[in-house]
Amino acid sequence: MTDYGVLGNLLVIFSVSIAVVFVFHQFRLPSIAGFLVAGALIGPHGLNLIADIGTVQVLAEIGVVLLLFTIGIEFSLVQLASLRRLLLDEGARDALFHRGRRVDWPKMLRDPTRNAQVTASMRALAAR
């Protein structure tokens, strides 16, 4: 016999998401924030409406893909072209500055491998 537990979980997710996004829309808040709040409410650390962690992880990955798709639809090529200088020039300069600050210079001089460089890059990202 077929297990329809995933369909029940999807029904719960869609029902709660529609309700929460409707409330967010009434307060003129972004729907993406509503989806995030709905996910927090539904999950095992919220109201525990879906207790199976494996199912939550799979559905969360699907939700992230849909979220990225939604964000991608909102950007146009004209907007990205206008932000090119900001994203490429200033973003790269900022990343290199923070990476340079985070380098363990004595380790870098002793061990010129990529190990010290990768560590510095991870520290620069974590500094945000």
Image (cartoon, grey):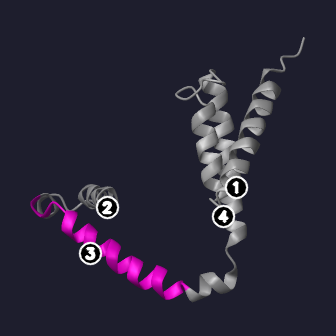
Q: Residue at x 78, y 36 (%)?
A: 15
How far is mark 4 from mark 3, CA to CA?
A: 29 Å
Horizontal side, residue 14 vs residue 115: left or right: right
Give the magenta part as a residue range. 83-106
Q: Name the residue tied to disc 2.
A: 121
Horizontal side, residue 43 vs residue 10: left or right: left
Q: Quick one: label 4 or label 3, which is nearer the N terminus?
A: 4
Q: Are the residues flagged by discs 4 and 2 in contact, CB closer than 8 Å?
A: no
Q: Give the SS element for disc 2.
A: helix
Q: Name the residue tied to disc 3.
A: 97
Three-letter amino acid code at disc 2? Ser
Q: Give the SS element for disc 1.
A: helix
How far is mark 1 from mark 2, CA to CA?
A: 43 Å
How far is mark 3 from mark 2, CA to CA?
A: 11 Å
Residue 9 position (above or below residue 115):
above
Q: Quick one: label 3 or label 1, which is nearer the N terminus?
A: 1
Q: Residue 4 sits in which quadrant?
A: top right
**Which quarter of the rendered picture does the N terminus lie within?**
top right
How far is mark 4 from mark 1, CA to CA?
A: 21 Å
Q: Quick one: label 3 or label 2, which is nearer the N terminus?
A: 3
Q: Name the residue tied to disc 4.
A: 71
Magenta highlight on residue 116: no
Residue 51 position (above or below residue 107):
above
Q: Are the residues flagged by discs 1 and 2 in contact, CB closer than 8 Å?
A: no
Q: Name the residue tied to disc 1.
A: 26
Q: Residue 62 sits in which quadrant?
A: top right
In front here: 40 or 21? Answer: 21
Badge nearest the viewer, 3 or 1: 1
Q: Quick one: label 4 or label 2, which is nearer the N terminus?
A: 4
